[in-house]
Amino acid sequence: MSELFSQALWITLLGMGLTFAAIVLFWGMMALITAIPVGAEKEAAETAPRDSIPTQAAAQKAKAAALAVALALAEQEQQQVAYFPMPETAFVSAWQLGMRTRQMYQKGSGR
């Protein structure tokens, strides 16, 4: 019995160890991935001319806003509201359903 218990303990420790090792590995990979672009962005910001950035950014924002408005207007024109009327079936309340079920049960057992 103690050998079975020790095997179960080793399997548990091995599984937990692998799980935490994978978590640490993923943490390290995410830290590496997030650290790499930071240096590239700083270099790009230092090499770009200082006075052209705000003008270019404002022009790009204006283009993006105009494109968004044009897409929204085009989508609004394409949308067609479909009206689905309620079906012509009669509405049955819970009380009616219970009574009809009871009547069907009584008719079925009387045969």
Image (spheres, rainbow, N blue to C red):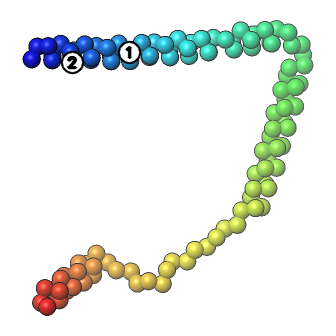
The N terminus lies in quadrant: top left
Residue drawn at x 42%, y 12% is: 21
Of residues 103 and 58, the one drawn nearer to the viewer in this rendering? 103
- Residue marked by disc 2: 8
Q: How many marks?
A: 2
Cβ–Cβ below 8 Å for labels 1 and 2?
no
Q: Position of residue 106 (x, y in %)?
A: 15, 86
**Would you call the spot at circle 1 few (<14 residues within 10 Å), some (14-19), or many (20 or more)?**
few
Q: Residue furthest left?
A: 1
Disc 1 to disc 2, how far (Cα)?
Answer: 15 Å
Q: Nearer the viewer, mark 1 or mark 2?
A: 2
Closer to the chain start, of discs 1 and 2, is 2
Q: Is residue 70 above or below residue 63?
A: below
Q: Position of residue 10 (x, y in %)?
A: 25, 13
Q: What's the residue type where badge 1 is placed?
A: Leu
Residue drawn at x 81%, y 38% is: 64
Of residues 2 and 88, the one drawn nearer to the viewer in this rendering? 2
Element type at mark 1? helix
Residue drawn at x 55%, y 14% is: 29
Q: Choose top left, top right, bottom left or bottom right for residue 31.
A: top right
- Residue marked by disc 1: 18
- Whether residue 99 appears in this view of the structure is no
Q: Position of residue 84 (x, y in %)?
A: 57, 74
Image position of 25 (left or right of 36):
left
Image position of 37 (left or right of 108):
right
